Amino acid sequence: MRHFLLLLVFLIGSEAFSQETYTLNGVVTDASSNETLIGVNLIVPEANTGVVTNDYGYYSIKLPEGEYLIEISYLGYQSVQRRIQLDSDKKLDFALTESSENLEEVVITSNNEGLNIKKPEMSVNKLSIGTIQKLPVVFGEVDVVRSLLLLPGVSNAGEGSSGFNVRGGAVDQNLILLDEATIYNSSHLFGLFSVFNPDAIKDLKLYKGGIPAEYGGRVSSVLDIYQRDGNSKEFKMQGGIGAVSSRLLAEGPIVKDKGSFLIGGRSSYAHLFLKLTDNENSAYFYDLNTKLSYNLNDRNKLLLSGYFGRDVFNISQNFENTYGNAVLNLRWNHIFSDNIFTNLSVIYSDYYYGLNLNFVGFNWDSGIRNLNIKYDFNHYINDQVQLKYGIQNTYYRFNPGEISPIDEDSGINYFKLTNKYALENALYISSEHRFSDNFSAEYGLRLSNFFRLGQDEINVYENNNPVEYDAERDIYREADILETIESSRGEILETFTNLEPRIALSYALNDSESIKASYNRMVQYLHLISNTSSPTPLDVWTPSGEFIEPQLLDQYAIGYFRNFKESEYSLEVETFYKQIDNRIDYIDGANLIANNAIERVVLNGESRAYGLELLLRKNKGRFTGWLAYTLSRSEQRTPGRTPDEPGINNGDWYAANYDKTHDLTITGSYDLNRKWQLNANFIFQTGLATTYPTAQYEYEGVTIPVYGERNGDRFPAYHRLDLSATFNPGVNKHKDFKSSWNFGIYNIYNRKNAYSISFRENSETMQNEAVKLSLFGIIPSVTYNFKF
């Protein structure tokens, strides 16, 4: 750590003290709402330099004394030029006006919806909310997560699956942040919708690699989403009415030009139509987004944001499943000086999942809670060096499960799985450094440690081994628990400390093409205990400890980036390799539900993923769109702990549940005229890995299947075509009221993609047969959106 800091000082020292300079700083906002704008470009052509606004719309840049032209540009807004005389430190705020020209909107890029060739940032994608709202989606519900699946390197485990997979990683390896608060399950209705209300979202960015040192705790990706602050000038409302769900959002000033509020809600109501029939089943969701923002003065701002969401799934009043996220974040933005911006956050996050089983007479409750305190600094050294550093502290409480009887006659006794507790801390520092016009870098270091804290019951095993290998039967089995001991909450059971270096390099061959490379070392101390390919409400998070080691990632990436015809076209090609140690696997026949000793069914293994990603875009004109292709492999193996043990799958590498060799997406948008816009996307993917039976035998009249290698088979290939059209009926009328209609057809040629394949004996022919289950065929939809 000391050597790294010395190197950092050496690298910036020559620039920081070379000559007297002055600081230009301020905030960039939306002129109509005072909403701060993230990622705005401020370019100084005479100095051949520039700066980008941070997550709170703040910028700072140091320049020698002189007269400069400042160019401010941001997608969807009119560009601004301002000539200034810099002879002292100056604070200069900018208010941008939305552009009325929509025909040349950039659809998707790596950063600021325009590829920055020279910036040391790679493996990063961003979608604008405007783009997301145009894409054809199932049931007509605008969906942030499903839109990400159209990007290279991002996929999921098929229709009806929760979460997403990034570069061959599992869903639990993604860090999902909403206003800096952790979201543990990003899906509604078991993956049909995402938890993010598009009307409330201001900015979202997906890091697949080259992840800055400020992020930690996961080893696959970071999805960083910020909610809008709300309009501090006037009251506004917007929403949408769809076939299965609707949404409404209101915003306005608390004190004009100083404070604002935002509150938005969504709810599905398809279950209400079921009540008109004899169907007693129902499934629905609802959520609420809220945010308060207040400027105390020019240097201090308070923000309070929250989210609450619930899903309810009910079968004949005998089985009810309720689950969802709740987060709350209080933030204080403070400007210490013209070149130091800070943010202090206190964040509470809670994920609850529960079952009400009336037919057996008990309730099941479980969940995970965390309290996070973080303090982040943006330090603008000069126009060539920007530092970020900070400290983070997170306390976890894990509730693996609690069973309680519904009433005295249920016959079920109260049972509580042992709560687990942990503390995770981190220090980080990183620098974005422009060495020359052609060469720049972002490098940093993160120091993380994890304390597994005491709990009420700790299991003791012979030879400290919770999983035994039975050589005679050639199987792994759960070891016997010799005794249980207690420990106090303040006792530290296990400690892990890791250094996580990060570096990203960019070398510009010229003004339109560059080569970039990155390396990431990341650590994940939490594990999702699940034997499915996507999260379900019964999945349980558990911390690292004596028997479960933290996951350790090393990822390497290199890419080529180029703009064509003044950025009308752009090309990104990246190749990556990632290795993860201590990826847990499960012994055959593992019981994961209500298991108070989960260490008895898991083994530590490893995983790897590698591949090639290509993204070709058309960014300007009446027709825009992109082609994304990923060729990749995601594998896992768990070798034996000793030479006498076979491990899982004989210790050989096998395809992960979410491995897809080929993944092709073609997306297009065409502005037919001022009122009509046509959109389409086509998706083709290699079928998911699975395990089929290869033989069978009979035992006491029962047919028992014999399965082949783990994940040695594949589902049929997945493909579909979606179409949509957006109609703006009064584009030139009633400026205070805007509306649009979105008509969509999901899976237009009615492809019956496989959700699962089961094997059974045909009752008529008495022959074995495979039965394919498909969730969706062709689905038409219509949604009415409004804003006033």
Image (cartoon, rainbow, N blue to C red):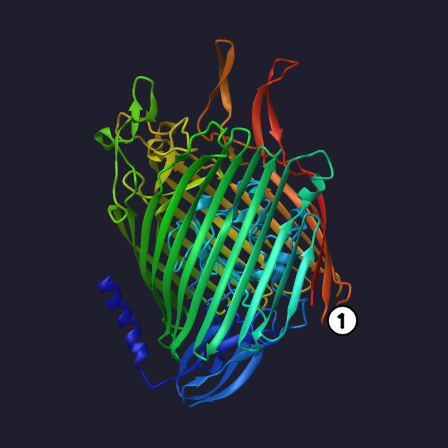
Image x and y of residue 539, in percent: 46, 39
Image side of residue 117 versus residue 74, left or right: left
Task: From the viewer's side, name the closer residue of 440 and 107.
Answer: 107
What residue is at 51 percent from the left and 63 percent from the top? Answer: 111
Task: From the viewer's side, name the closer residue of 211 and 300.
Answer: 300
Image x and y of residue 739, in percent: 73, 63
User: Is residue 9 visible in the rendered structure shown here?
Assistant: yes
In the image, residue 447 sits, relative to residue 542, either above or below, namely below
What residue is at 57 percent from the left and 56 percent from the top? Answer: 288
In the image, residue 49 sits, relative to residue 292, either above or below, namely below
Query: Hey, which quadrant is residue 756 in on the image?
Result: top right
Question: How many numbered marks are there?
Answer: 1
In the image, residue 60 sits, relative to residue 566, either above or below, namely below
In the image, residue 29 sits, relative to residue 153, either above or below, namely below
Q: Looking at numbered disc 1 in the image, what kind of residue is underneath it? A: His
**Residue linked to disc 1:** 734
What residue is at 52 percent from the left and 87 percent from the top? Answer: 83
Task: From the viewer's side, name the closer residue of 596 and 764.
Answer: 596
Query: Hey, which quadrant is residue 771 in on the image?
Result: top right
Image x and y of residue 280, in percent: 66, 35
Which quarter of the image is occupied by the C terminus? bottom right
Which quarter of the image is occupied by the N terminus? bottom left
What residue is at 48 percent from the left and 61 percent from the top? Answer: 179
Image x and y of residue 143, in percent: 60, 52
